[in-house]
Amino acid sequence: MSAEALLGHATFALLILSVLMTKMLHLRIVGIAAGLAGILYSGAVGDYVSATWFAVFVAVNAAQIAFASWKNRGFSFSADDWMFRQHIAPKLDPQLTRRLLATGHWGTAEPGFVFTQRGQMVSHLYFIAEGEVRVTVEEVEVGLCYRGSLVGEISILSGTPATATAVALTPVRYLALERAKLRELIAKERDVEHAIDLSFRKEFHDKIASANEALVDAERRIAILSRKQRPSRSASAAAPE
């Protein structure tokens, strides 16, 4: 296979690869690589019209990267905002993180505050920055949420009522992301959708692991209580009338 043919195949392979990228920055970088390969290929075969358009393609992608960098310059986050970013969207660019934060507000809840009520629709997705939240189903504790946890993500993701009740055990510092605004942003921005999806998957995995640990602990306690009760029953049966 000739060098020109290899360049041609590389050009279109890179173009296909670029559309498979899940992050816009990666898409543009691979797109630029495809455009540069296309310029070399078009020049080698004498197709200067295609070479010109490949050059335009490279310039547009490079300009978009430069513009995104310019928009993100000088972004600063509060301590709370930075914590949210580190836990939920560490790889999301600052400008999109700002837009994500703008869908909600920070607040403080006293013990007893109800974040979600089983069977009711969830109005906000809550990020817990400080404090503890007790999660129950039919008044049975199924887990605790701590710093870095999400509350209400299953309802937000599925569009169904909450499957559990979540109540503050201690004073809680939280970020409440409004359901409608969050879903609108996710629908518009693929990178935000990807970041939220990853955080939801991690949160779901952590909660399943926590529930399994609670189940094992409950079974262990039942076994201990059963062993303690056996001797007393035997002694009662052996006692003279």
Image (cartoon, helix red, strand yellow):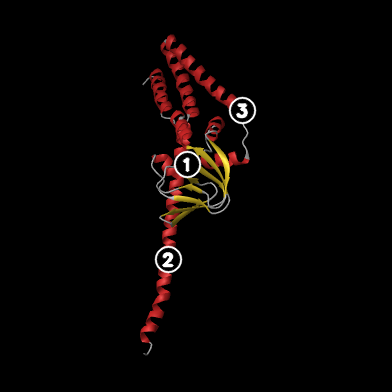
* Residue picked out by circle 1: 199
Q: Toward which corner of the image does residue 46 lie, by quadrant?
A: top left
Q: Position of residue 82 (x, y in %)?
A: 59, 39
The residue closer to the viewer here, 146 or 15, is 146
| Identity, as a three-letter code, of the amino acid under mark 1 | Ser
Q: Which mark is residue 220?
A: 2
| Identity, as a three-letter code, of the amino acid under mark 2 | Arg
Q: Where is residue 80 in the image (x, y as percent from the top left)?
A: 60, 41
Q: Quadrant of the C terminus?
A: bottom left
- Mark 3 or 2: in front is 2
Q: Position of residue 180 (x, y in %)?
A: 46, 34
Q: Is residue 10 above or below residue 127?
A: above
The residue closer to the viewer here, 232 or 25, is 232
| Identity, as a three-letter code, of the amino acid under mark 3 | Arg
**How busy is the neighbourhood of tag 1: few (under 14 within 10 Å), some, or many (20 plus)?**
some
Tell me the CA gap for discs 2 and 1: 32 Å
Q: Is mark 2 on a helix, strand or loop?
A: helix
**How busy is the neighbourhood of tag 3: few (under 14 within 10 Å), some, or many (20 plus)?**
few
Q: Is mark 1 on a helix, strand or loop?
A: helix
As drawn, is 25 to the left or to the right of 47? right
* Residue picked out by circle 3: 73
Q: Is mark 3 on a helix, strand or loop?
A: loop
**How busy is the neighbourhood of tag 2: few (under 14 within 10 Å), some, or many (20 plus)?**
few
The structure residue drawn at horizontal position 38% and vertical position 80%, both measured from the top left corner, is: 233
Tell me the CA gap for discs 3 and 1: 25 Å
Of the numbered discs 3 and 2, the one sitting upstream in the chain is: 3
The residue closer to the viewer here, 36 or 46, is 36
Q: In this view, does 80 lie above or below 2?
A: below
